[in-house]
Amino acid sequence: MASVNLMTVRRTSLAPLLTWLRDREPGLAASLLGGAVAAGLGFASFAALLMVLWVSSPYPDSGPGGALHVAAALWLLSHGVELVRTDTLSGAPMPVGVTPLLLLALPVWRVYRAARDTVDAPDDADGPPPVPASTVWTGVVLGYLGVGAAVALYFSNGELRPAWAGVRVCLPLVAAGSAAAGVWSAYGSPREPVLRALVVVPAPVRRLVFGADARARLGTAVRATGAAMAVLCGGGASLVAVSLIWHGEAARVSFLQLTEGWTGRFAVLMLGIALIPNAAVWAASYALGPGFLLGAGHAVHPFASAPAPLLPPFPLLAAVPDPGVGTPLNWVAGLVPAAAGMTAGWFVARGAVSRPGSGAPASVRWSAVRTAGVVLLTATVCAVAFALLAELAGGRLGVAALAEFGPVWWRAGGVEGAWTAVFALPVALVVRACRLWGLRKRGGAIPAQDTGAGRHGKVPTTTSGNGAEEGDRKAKDTAKAEGGENTKGRGKESGTTGTDEEELYDFLPAGDPFPAPWHDDLARVSHRPARREATAEDDPEAPRDSVDASAGPATAPPPEPRPDVIDPRPRPDPHDPRPDDTEPPDTTD
């Protein structure tokens, strides 16, 4: 019979789950809780609004369970998940794929805030370290997706049910992207994760993006894109407002035709407000030229509008331009993308030549050729951004005539990039030239242009040296105030470039670098022979006990030493008093 050694055969003291809980990274539980709370609050906001409308409705069609099903459907629709409607007249399921962009902002903001707050970065350096980025991202995404999967399963058998392909793709994309942005922002927006993510870009584009001064060019392109998108979408919203006023009677009839009770009209009004960003993107695509589709083969653009199919009554659809050939009134919409392109060009020129600010000199980052390259980069970013907006703003509302609804993303994005390049390039070059002319008019030298090495040219400021204690500080103050004018000290020696010295020796103490005269006896004794020899060279007839103020001519003080070459030996002072009789005799002779 085999013997068993009790010292070697042992059971594990903890179960695998308890071992994992013991060895888990700190902050994982808080991250899971943060993601779950973000998803729960988002669903609760929709549920609260729908429950209020159900309670106040004079003819509720179903109980509170039906209101919760609609709230769950709207919550998933806000993530871009396509819904399927089964209660149709034909009995065939119909897709609902138009995502209200205003509702999309709600889950994105909640996940972003959850990830940013979970990092818990300390305010001071002595605080505890933040939670690791991978832990926060994983926990927030898993917690959010857990609640999202539960909500999708809850109403999977209702009249409005989710399309599981959208649940598997859109919901994780929104959660992962928003959480990554929140963690990146909480860590101070470092550059390294962005560079690692852009490695998938092709080599020629990567060399263009990762070249010299890449961060400044990318930052300028992103800011110019944001400004151009704001002008373009804002102009689209203005076009929607003008069209609603122009078709005011038709919009009013469609609004009253949908429902009769005030609760139903309030719900229609809220839905219309949530779809205003979508309508603004549609109008912007209309102003660009490609327009949008109101069904398969029914295009609407400034040059012609095909007759639309039978559309459901809705106020925003009533504002669609009338069918027929376009008129000059329709062509006026082209001013919107032109203004967006010129705005982008102005922002690029602002980054190419910066004006002198408080304490900061003017600088020229790029030449005209590099400025044109930044304009093309901005046009590319604008094309990608608007193509994404066009794809999110449209969708399917049926399987036949309404299978294509909204702008075509690749057409809208490509034309937007072309508009930006055409109108931004001349504006950027002209504004850059005007800024350089303004610098020349103010009397300052034109800063050196950067040729790609990442250097910033600066307006040279020259200061003159002096021979007294306060002269150096006065020269620096005058050079800072006048931005390049030559200031004169009390000495006659020529100074050095003030800007370079201030930058190189900014770490020196604010006090006088040359100390006060020596007044102790030891210093007088040690420096007396040097003063006596200097006096003997100047005036052989003078007595040996007399000390002159300087070794050079009496009319000019000795030159100030350069700050970078400081003589460690003590210097004689012209106002040093004659040594008294108590000094020990000099034995050097």
Image (cartoon, helix red, strand yellow):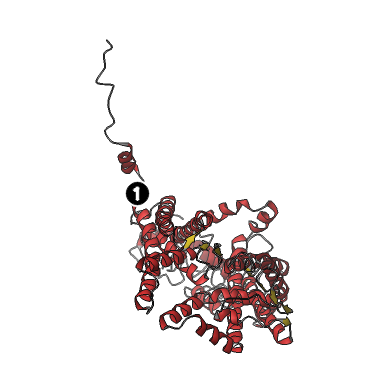
Q: Secondary structure at mark 1?
A: loop
Q: Is residue 101 left or right of residue 131?
A: right
Residue in view at x 34 percent, y 51 percent:
29
Within 10 Å of disc 1 (Cα), the crowding (few <14, some 14-19, many 20+) is: some
In this view, the residue farthest toward the top is 1
Residue 298 in view (yes/no): yes
Q: Is residue 454 above or below residue 9?
A: below
Q: Quadrant of residue 73?
A: bottom left
Q: Position of residue 204 (x, y in %)?
A: 70, 54
Q: Amino acid at mark 1?
A: Pro
On screen, residue 349 above or below 179: below
- In this figure, which residue is indicated by the disc labeled 1? 26
The one of 370 and 510 positioned closer to us in this rendering? 370
Residue closest to the eye, 381 or 77: 77
Residue 513 appearing in the image: no
Apparent side of residue 57 relative to residue 247 in the rendered image (left or right): left
Q: Residue at x 28, y 36 (%)?
A: 14
Q: Is residue 24 above or below residue 315?
A: above
Percent x, y of residue 250:
58, 86
Name the spot of residue 487 as percent of width and height, x first: 58, 78
- Name which quarter of the figure residue 431 lies in: bottom right
Q: Nearer the viewer, residue 583 or 215?
A: 215
> Is 217 or 78 nearer to us in this picture?
78
Percent position of residue 120, x then y: 37, 59
Judged from this view, the residue extending furthest toward the left is 6
Number of numbered discs overlaid on the protein picture: 1
Can you say whether 315 is above or below 182 in the image?
below
The N terminus appears in which quarter of the rendering?
Answer: top left
